Image (cartoon, rainbow, N blue to C red):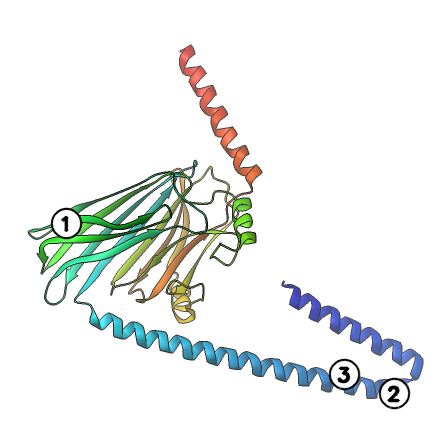
Amino acid sequence: MSHRYWTFALAVLGAIGSLLTAWATIGPLSTAVLAAIFVVGWATYLTFRLQRLRMQDDIFRRREEAYLAAFTEIASAFNFKERSHQYELKMKLDGSATCKREVDLVVTRGEISSRDDRRGYWGNNEPSDYDLSITGSGNGSRVTRRIVHQTPRWIGFLIEFSPPLSTDAQYTIRERIGPGGYAMTKDDILEQIQRGNWLPQGPYEAETFHVKVPTDRLVHRVLLPLSYPTCGSNWDVMIGDSVERFEREYERVAHGHFFKREPVGDYLLLELDVPNPRIGASYWIQWTPPSRAQYQKCLRGISSRRSRQGRSSDNR
């Protein structure tokens, strides 16, 4: 329960206590007058608050409708779409990760020679190394990648089709991300929040997928080691690259039960499987890392087990 509700509850209890005290000191008639004033005052306050909430909801609804109209117009401008996009991030305990994106693309009119993509990191996260490769083909078109801009925390690249693609293509993008690209402890995130350079609205890590082209199906997965002691996981849907929730799409995903969480082998699978994802929406998979002490204890435990296994192997 948030502090606002506790404050409200304490205010009500205080008012009741004051009325009881008045009853005992000035008599029931005067107390009744005070009670009437109290009820009218609270009714006025609650009416005012309700009106403000309705105005805020109306503003959010109008803003969302404007976004939807803009996104619909953007979608009509594309001459290709993705029949499916399967995105999988696999984390390792040392903070490194691999990412695989399997794309099934079809040209709806004309032809395309390239499309853009990118990779970025929250706050001060910076991977120690990074590698990007692409494989696939497009009915006679060769599929390659070309990096157009790169900094320690951001990379932009083009996926190029030669000759230009006029039918469909299936390709896979593979990324290898060194340690440092993701915050592995809650303490690291809290420190970045204090410095004001952490975008997510809370002490959690997230892997996001921004739908920029018409897509029939999005499968967005994150695999975390079961030995990594996370403190919870969840999902969300935001508008574009903002941290403002896309309420309509969030409700559709929630009602459709498109999110699942389950162990798979040595990993915890967090997955959003979304039919017809909304263009312009960002689908977030979130997890809360352990404290620094918990994480270091986990690493020591893994190192100790490996050491014992090594000695056992030498004895044999």
Q: How many angstroms separate mark 1 from mark 3 (CA)? A: 72 Å
Residue identified by numbered label 2: 30
- Percent across and percent down for residue 273 are 33, 57
- Percent across and percent down for residue 171 are 18, 50
SS at circle 1: strand
* Rendered position, 52 above or below 192: below
First reached walking from the N terminus: tag 1 or tag 2: 2
Residue identified by numbered label 1: 143
SS at circle 3: helix
Q: Residue at x 74, y 68 (%)?
A: 10
Residue identified by numbered label 3: 38
* Rendered position, 153 above or below 58: above
Would you say 100 lies left or right of 290 here? left
Q: In which quadrant is the C terminus drawn?
A: top left
SS at circle 2: helix
Determine crowd level at label 3: few under 14, some 14-19, many 20+ residues with C-alpha closer than 10 A.
some
